[in-house]
Amino acid sequence: MGQSDTRVRIQGAAATLFRRHGYSATGLKRIATEAEAPFGSIYHFFPGGKQQLAEDMIRTSGSEYGRMVLALLDSVADPAESLVHAFDAAADDLAAADYADACPIGTVALEVASSNEVLRAATAEVFEEWVDAAAQWFGHWVAEPAAARSLACSMVMMLEGAFMLSRASRDPEPLRVAGRSMAELLRTAVTRADKG
Amino acid sequence: MGQSDTRVRIQGAAATLFRRHGYSATGLKRIATEAEAPFGSIYHFFPGGKQQLAEDMIRTSGSEYGRMVLALLDSVADPAESLVHAFDAAADDLAAADYADACPIGTVALEVASSNEVLRAATAEVFEEWVDAAAQWFGHWVAEPAAARSLACSMVMMLEGAFMLSRASRDPEPLRVAGRSMAELLRTAVTRADKG
DNA sequence: GTCTATACCGCGATAGAC
DNA sequence: GTCTATCGCGGTATAGAC
């Protein structure tokens, strides 16, 4: 049996709703409805209520999303081409989802940054996890650790900003531009290392 | 007299609260309290209620913020140095505001993207306004219009993403990294134009 | 026109029947 | 353990006194 079915459905519904509409706009009653679970089950499986549900989502979906992006980057040999490919894939996915499902934690991160210390810290840890993993990936082509980390940080920021503009304008173009800019930054860093 | 004092105070309180906590988490009662205005005055000056107040804020604060950033960019002669300086200034401001006051419309933009068409369109128009203005600025150094526009779009995305990471981690460093990456992108574009 | 009181609803959370 | 009924609160919005 392992994990309860109901628990998993609640987590899934919470992840979708928090991702699309954010923390404040998502009600526990709606989560229960979409999960086809009785309301009381939320507090049975998540005694900490809404905050616990959100923290669970931030860490779980956050780690999962990070692994997904890194796997996408590893799927193409040339790193600059890989960046373009990954951002183009994100653009296609976002458009296919009618601009609803972008970064799983981005909206929540901004909402809670100045009002909920527990959730703020959770988002910060996820972002750091992503930057660490991406810095390792960039490290394959950029020897200088500081340069690799800077590229990694820029990639995460560019992705989050591109999601914001693409969702707002209902246009995949910002995400495509972001991928090309990241490829450009990588090429510059590699060229510099060759010469320096 | 011109504009009513009360109306201006309501707009100011709304701008601050929407910026810090987003759309859903901001209540009209709290806006009235912080504006030191009677609750009924909100509906007197903004018959459209919360949505009208938010749309007004998005367009007003959005345009104002765009002009402010462009003025900051124009205050330093060398464009690459100017980008570094502007992002560093944003980093200092954000830290000084205890990581509360970043982009006036970023949080709201993500919240409403899939749930409120009027507000989504308003944020999209503001972002486009910013990209247009920034593209004109980059055009001073990059002749190719498509390249200037790509840089402009990347700058806005990088700024939004940097605000997200800096607020989440309560650390100005992401904003500083973003500025250096944008300077790098600009130098690459300028160099390319010189050679091509 | 300014402001207060209130209607009405949905929220997060809980108690307790089964 | 699963589920329902309800509590108290705060939300948006409005009606009407002054």
Image: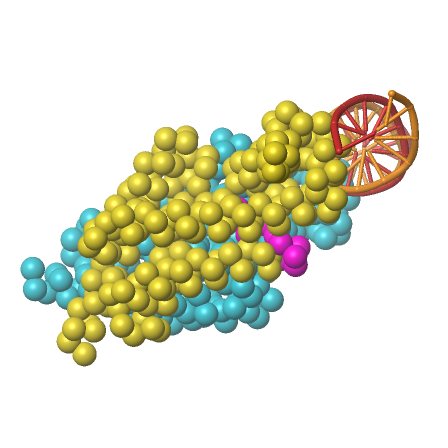
Chain colours: A yellow, B cyan, C orange, D red
How far from the left and from the top, in percent, is residue A95?
36, 33
Q: Taking B16 as reference, is B119 above or below it?
A: above
How far from the left and from the top, in percent, is residue A33?
65, 26
The answer to whether residue B132 is visible is: no
How far from the left and from the top, in percent, is residue B33?
75, 49
User: Which stretch is magenta?
Assistant: A107-119
Residue in the picture at 74% in, 38% down: A44
The answer to whether residue A23 is visible is: yes
Residue in the picture at 61% in, 38% down: A2
Give A99 or A122, whichever is nearer the viewer: A122
Q: Taking D2 as reference, is A106 above or below it?
A: below
Residue in the picture at 44% in, 41% down: A102
Give B116 or B67, whichever is nearer the viewer: B116
Residue in the picture at 50% in, 34% down: B114
Q: Magenta-highlighted stretch: main secondary structure?
A: helix
Drawn side of residue B194 relative to residue A39, left or right = left
**Residue A27 colored magenta?**
no
